[in-house]
Amino acid sequence: MDMAQCSRYDMVRAWTTCPGEKGVSGKELVTENESVLLSNTMSVRILGCSLTLDASNIKKLQATRCGRWVSIRAPGASTELRALLGCWASSPETVGIAPRRPVGATPGKPLRQLGDLGGNSPEDLELAAGGSTQRLLAHLLSRALREMSEEPSKEAESEAQERAKPAQSVSAAFLTPEAVTTDEAQREAGPKEESSRERVLESQAARRGSGSEAEQEPASDPGPQPHPSWASGPPVERPRPVGQEAPAASPEPPRRCHTDCLEAPLSRVFGRLGRIVGSYPWAFLLVPVMLTAALGTGFIYLPKEKENLEEQYTPIGSPAKAERRFVQAHFSTNDSYRFSASRMSTEANFASLLVVCNTPSLLEGEVFAEISRLDQAVQNLKVTLENGTQILYREACAKYKAFCVPPNPLLFAWQHNRTMDLGKLTFPIFHLLGHPVSLANFLGGNVLGERVGKNHFLLQSKAMRLLYFLKTEQPEESEQSKEWLIHFLEQFNNIKDRLALEKIKVVHFTSLSRQMEFESTSMTVIPLFHLAYILIILFAIVSCFRLDCIRNKMWVAVIGVFSVAMAVVSGFGLLLHVGVPFVIIVANSPFLILGVGVDDMFIMISAWQKTSLLDSTRDRLSNVYSKVAVSITITTITNVLAFYTGIMSSFRSVQYFCIYTGTTLLFCYFYSITCFGAIMALDGKREINCLNWVKRPDPKYASLKRTCCFPCGSVLDGCGEDNHPMNLFFRDYFGPFLIKPKSKIFVVLVYILYIISSIYGCFHVQEGLDLRNLASDDSYIIPYFNIEEDYFSDYGPRVMVIITESINYWDEDVRQQLEACMIQFEENEFVDNSLREFWLNAYLQYLKNAKKNPNDKKTFMDNISGFITAFPFFKYDINISSSNEITCSRGFIQLMSVSSSKNKKLMVLQLRDIAAKCEVPLIVYNQAFIYFDQFAAILENTVRNVMVASTAMFIVSLSLIPHPVCSVWVTFAIASVIVGVTGFMAFWNVNLDSISMINLVICIGFSFDFSAHISYAFVSSSKDTVNKRSVEALYMLGYPVLQSAISTIIGVFALSVAKAYIFRTFFKIMFLVMLFGAIHGLVFIPIFLTFF
């Protein structure tokens, strides 16, 4: 083509194809792309490549991927245009820039001179977004066609009819909604709708003979279709250019069963919001900052009082709490005169020492002597208050009559008789001065000999427990006891050092230890906030860094991280203002929000990078909002719903965590579409300013710059799409590899192994929160609990069996019913049948010895007072009314083998079941049941919360992503990930407790995000095979899913080095959630979708 014959602007056609559809290498482009404007030799930006077009290379365009826009610049000309890049269309209406390939057109030859367009300034051609530029170009084209009146030659017409071929329409995902129609209508119209003006144009082109005719290569593949966003709506009809007639009506193409009744309106609303934010960025930046400053004042209300462990980590309204209220209302104790630990309704103030000997057995005089020295040192402790008052142990201790309750009955007996033969002891009952004393909870690591009645000879014992009970019932006495305990904790290590113990090692614990250590644990996580933010900022910099100073979004990403921090301050501050308690588990929330919040930031930055630099800032931001704001809204709704369903939990700690996290996520979403959008708008203005100073690079270095750009980012030389290399990786390598038959078989086998392992783990996961896990790893209570589990796990606490109503105790039939119930208790696997303690049995023996009839009511009731005088410790087991009626009473059974959480759960359920089935009204209670109830409640709560959250996710998926296949696969993925996370918790030594229950609820939200995006991209794909749809879904959303998983893992990674179980557990489960969620989204779901 003689370029001298061309006017300033000529309309030409360039036949190109994107590689990948039929294995094209990328060097020879075969797909027919939309027309572009040329002027002599011109630099053209197509598909992320810089090209130079002239007559010699019009057929050898170099490209490596498909894109959306073409940027054309004519050196020496003042006009810069953009033209939509698409496939061939069969009518002018479908393109809006140029008609379809006219009759007689030859690939590579100019169609015709359209007149000098130089009179139209760039401002005229860039009037507004949303298709106005395309309509203007269509109008100019129509005007040029009307000016050409020559008739076409028959040769040209014949040649064109032989060459004309139908093509496909442009996808809605790459055009504005006003600019699209269906390809079916185009093919139906075909050559019949060609106008005379087109034939005139073809005739003129044949006569002009400008340039050599290039040989057309038949395109067996129409080229890749544009990739629809899962949040975009279906195509709508494009307005016809001026002067064109409507094509003949054609049947509607088959539509997929989904609707945009919510998506399309939301997209338009967000597009308008983006335009407003882009127009007034400073307002949308400063308002969130001022709101954060105002709400941040709520931190002055951070609770300074101690966090009640029982209130936060035991079930609300548990049976044990109701049982405790009954005990407190009907039974009294007296810790100043007749203290009995087993009769206490609440935990008493106490200090406990576990002594382990360094010899085979501590039943030696020398070992007892050393233990006795330790005991005396503890009892000699005294604390001086600020007012000078001294508190001695003998004043604060719980008493039996006038003496402190001995810390260990066997040690007490030896201290009063050091000649005692320790080789002739019996276990578990030891007779001290004629009185039976239970040693079950005082000696551990025992080796028993031959049986003696209900006892055994005690051959060896490895450990001893010393319990120093203090007064609890009166508030003033209880405060003094706590002061003594605090002094004990401060001085205990000094006591050990001073005594220089050689034959024993000792660990300590108090009734205040759990609370104090739990509070100190919260302080260990504060330094981790800094580590988390540093890691996230580094990840944001790496993800958004570009060598191109225009497209570099490093500092935008850093500011985005601070936007997430503002959301945390605002959300927490608001809830503190309204009085929602702040508990230690809430400290996990900022780490999670940090990871989730930056996901939205990355999505918005990615969408911004795909906009044209030639658009105004507000148009670019409007484009970003219309495309990604709906997606961000959906994920926010699902995550917030998942958290707010946790409010129904029976655990206060879970409720407060979910309230704080869900509310803060709403602030994070609000700040993303306001504050961060404003930051992007301001950065967009920076990009415009930078364009005036950046020199256009030589096209021959484009590929080199693409390779060198860190991290794997493309450098844009014009205005086009920034197609990240990771997207190409999923399209060109990972996706094709995954859909191979051998890969599918391997994936299916891996999934079968995964689900089998997960189900196996589900049956072995431990339930309930071990109280030792509330402390940090270096806490002194950890060794205490470990030794207690090793040596004192054979016997558990003593349990009250309470007759809750007045019954006829003198009626032999009633007594037989009651005895039958007691026998059922003793036959239970968790009860020692030799250690029952029941006043009725003792009273019947008392009446028998007195030769009195127990079946006579008067005799039975009149002799109770004498019985209580003889056995005063039974006084607190019988509640006699003023009318001389026994309103309720209680006995005791001894538990055994209940060290594991599973056994604790089974024991509580079985004992309550026996009580419920008994003909006599009974309940069972021990103060430890308050914590044991969590083992029974945690599974029920978890299942209920997961089911409610899953139902909410299903409703959301049907409403906002209305495709049945999508909803089914979303539900499948949620169930599969939950099973996997729960099962692998057992392999990673994580219990199913209130902390992990939170994570399982979170799991639902993230599983929804990963699976919904991929499955919807699959069902919305226009590809003709399931394999191609799967690859396209990975191409579109594989990298965002991977990026989301990585950013969230990085956000909680700092918790992995925490010294507390409750924080490490949060990391472990979130890691499993992200890992399995990403694997489902990137591997399992894309493969399984190809099977149906």
Image (cartoon, rainbow, N blue to C red):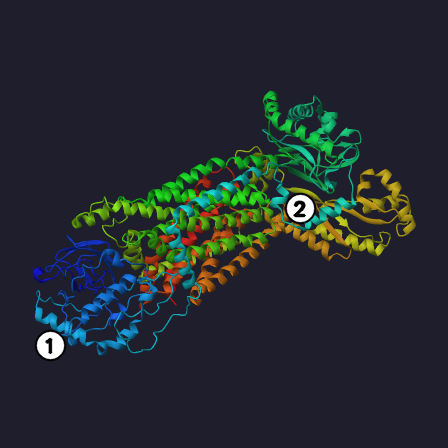
Other residues around mark 2 within 10 Å, as few (<14) / some (14–19) / many (≥20): many
Label 2 with label 1: CB-CB less than 8 Å: no
The front one of 831 and 696 is: 696
- Quadrant housing the N terminus: bottom left
- Label 1 residue SS: loop
Q: Residue at x 21, y 65 (%)?
A: 32
Query: Residue 88 occupies which quadrant of the picture?
Result: bottom left
Residue 440 position, x and y percent, is 69, 39
Quarter of the image for residue 306 reads top right
Please tell me which residue is depicted at 49% across the width and 40% down the height of the picture.
293
Q: Where is residue 646 in the image (x, y as percent from the top left)?
A: 55, 52
Mark 2 against mark 1, which lies toward the viewer? 1
Amino acid bearing label 1: Ser
Where residue 260 sits: x, y (%)?
A: 41, 66
Three-letter amino acid code of the residue under disc 2: Phe
Q: Nearer the viewer, residue 111 or 980?
A: 111
Outermost residue toward the front?
Answer: 119
Identify the residue position indicated by label 2 in the image: 929
Mark 1 Cα shell of 10 Å, populated few (<14), some (14-19), many (≥20): some
| Res. 991 in view | no
Q: Tell me how far mark 2 sits from mark 1, CA to CA.
A: 99 Å
Which mark identifies residue 153? 1
On residue 12, the disc is none
